Image: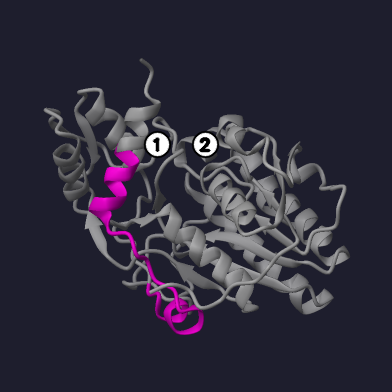
Amino acid sequence: MTSTFSRNWEHAVVTGGSGFVGSHLCAALLDSGAAVTCVDDFSTGRPENVAHLLDRPGFTLVRADAAEGLSVDRPPDLLLHFASPASPADYLRLPLHTLETGSLGTRHALELAHRCDARFLLASTSEVYGDPQQNPQDERYWGNVNPVGPRSVYDEAKRFSEALTTAHADAEGTDTCIVRLFNTYGPRMRGHDGRAVPTFVRQALDGEALTVTGDGCQTRSLCYVDDTVRGILAAAAHGMRGPVNIGNPTEITMLDLARLVIELTGSTSEIRFIERPTDDPAVRCPDITLARDKLGWEPAVDAEEGLRRTIDWFRATANP
């Protein structure tokens, strides 16, 4: 199913635009004919993710920290707020920066969108559901989050940013949308960012043991990045406030994922079990009824095909 909603944007600002998902968004927006200003402080995003866009007409790269303020040369009609450390390795390394980006950064982004009468879209996360007691998770579920645990800097930053976005829409009339992204994977992920897919792929290609936490029975739902980007842009074009889940409703255990990566890479790697992180969710699966019904959106790339594309990219970008 392809989305039935599209819109011709003139100028989009993407905070966190040199990150994994942000860089794919920048490319998709340029392909649609929009001018794009990518704002990033490179605390976790990488300049090489957007290096191929630098010579494209309409693309501007600005180095700035959203938490310190946002200023652009040309008013946008769309602002996509994706600035935030997103992997456990990053937000555990940058706890205060993560909280500041979710609070101050979101406020600055909302204020810019309001001044310019732009559509504002917040990239939230399935982590707002915490370790869920409901599976699959729909948008009405309030979650089960530990506010003082090691993951809280990310979970609560996103929950606060959702509250702030909602309050800004109610108090100021800002045109806002919240998307809750579930596990997304694909090219341009960092092999050492701590997330399962890039970790397993890197380990398999290097001949290392694949490190599965706990007994590997915990589940995730994996959405290929092209599908995620389609869903984000459909939500932006629709005019809905959300929140709306964007993710793949097919669950896979971490042990089965590790085995599939070994099979697809042709690796001789073994599997090694390690300690499971504190507050690691036991299940993670989106109910995408709202996205299907309102946006005409659902994922099109299955796990095997998406993993093949991701593995091919890791092979192509490996050091000689």
Q: Nearer the viewer, residue 249 or 168?
A: 249
* Quadrant assignment, res 57: top right
Mark 1, other Cα within 10 Å: few <14 / some 14–19 / many ≥20:
some
Q: Which residues are magenta?
A: 287-311
Q: Is residue 306 magenta?
A: yes
305 to the left or right of 184: left
**Relative vertical location of residue 246 with respect to residue 320 in this rendering, above or below:** below
Residue extending furthest top? 320
**193 and 63: which is toward the camera:** 63
Callout 1 amino acid: Gly
Q: Secondary structure at mark 2?
A: helix
Q: Position of residue 260 (x, y in %)?
A: 17, 45
Point out which mark residue 90 bears.
Answer: 2
Question: Seen in the image, is 104 located left or right of residue 252?
Answer: right
- Would you identify the image quadrant in which residue 250 lies? bottom left
The percent coordinates of residue 296 (x first, y second) are 45, 79
Q: Is residue 191 magenta?
A: no
Colour convention of the picture = one colour
Question: Mark 2–mark 1 contact, CB under 8 Å?
Answer: yes
- Residue shown at 66%/68% (left/top)? 163
Main SS of the magenta part reads helix
Residue 208 in picture, x, y percent from top left: 21, 24
- Residue annotated with mark 1: 194
Residue at the image position 60 percent from the left and 32 percent from the top: 51
Please tell me which of labels 2 and 1 falls first in the chain.
2
Residue at 34%, 73% in the rendered image:
134
Please give the count of numbered marks on the rendered protein. 2
The image position of residue 83, as x and y in percent, is 64, 47
Name the residue rendered at 85%, 57% in the picture. Answer: 75
